[in-house]
Each structure stands twice: as C-alpha cells, then as structure tokens.
Image: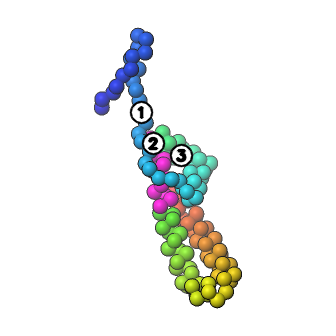
Amino acid sequence: MELIYEKCGDYLIPNLFPNREPEGELRKFGLMRRQYLKEHRSGIYSGLLLTGKLKEHLLAVQEQAEQRFDVLVEQMAAAEGVTEQLKAADQMLWVRKMNGIRARAEEVVREELIYCL
C-alpha cells in the first residue's frame, strides 16, 4: 500500500481518503433498512459504516426489496383478479384493491428483507 504524505510544519501527515461510495440513490426500502440498523442493530450499523460498506449494503437490500415487492404485487393482483379490465370498468374499486395489495406486499418485504439480518 502506498501512502502520500503532506508536510505540515516539521511533521509528515498521511493523506487518508475514504473509499468511494457506490453510485446510487437510497429510496424508501434503503432508507428504512438504514433506520432499522441504526436504531436496533447499532453494532452492525457501526461496523458497516466504519468499513465503508454501509451504502453498498443498503443499495443491495433496496434492490432485492424492490424486486420482491414488484413480484408480490404482480402475483397478488393476478390471484385476486385485479386487471386492466377492472380498472376500465370501476377505477375506484381497482384503486382500493391495488392499495390493499401494495400495503400487504410492503409488509411482507419489510418482514422478510428490511427488519431481518
């Protein structure tokens, strides 16, 4: 490992740069995971933060959660007969059913991926 030093008076001080964080924006599930780790699993949170792998972990969990959420919504909608024909016939019924499906799918994702280790 090669270190670069900067002279400050009579002392040489190493220039330490943290690892670059991965590109990506934290959205709903990533932010929920970060809050959970921070409040309930502070040791894991601190370890990930100190090693520079926190954002990488959060982005991975977020990606898994979003994929699982989309699959669950699609499967539940198909099982309950919530289709485009229903949307065209009765929009308010379609909205009510989809809101319920999305709420249940989000609850499953939170229990399976966000609030677990």
Question: Are discs 2 and 3 less than 8 Å apart at CB?
Answer: no
**Which comes before the other along the chain, label 2 or label 3?**
3
Q: Which residues are magenta?
A: 51-63
Quarter where residue 15 is shown: top left
Q: Position of residue 68 (x, y in %)?
A: 50, 69
Locate residue 11, reporting x and y percent.
41, 14
Q: Which residue is mark 1?
A: 17
- Between residue 62 and residue 47, name the one nearer to us: 62
Label 1 near label 2: C-beta < 8 Å? no
Can the viewer see residue 41?
Answer: yes
Query: Residue under circle 2?
Result: 52
> What residue is drawn where x is 44% and y is 45%?
21
**Left or right relative to 102: residue 60:** left
Q: The residue under label 1 is which amino acid type?
A: Phe
Q: Amino acid at mark 3?
A: Tyr
What residue is disc 3 on? 45
Residue 89: quadrant of the picture: bottom right
Magenta-colored stretch includes residue 55: yes
Instruction: Please tell me whether mark 2 or mark 3 is closer to you in this view.
Output: 2
**How far apart are the alpha carbons under marks 1 and 3?**
21 Å
**Location of residue 91 in the rendering, given as x and y in whole percent from the top left corner:** 66, 83
* Residue that sits furthest to the front in the current view: 88
Please name whichever residue, 55 or 87, is drawn nearer the observer in this view of the structure: 87
Dominant SS in magenta: helix
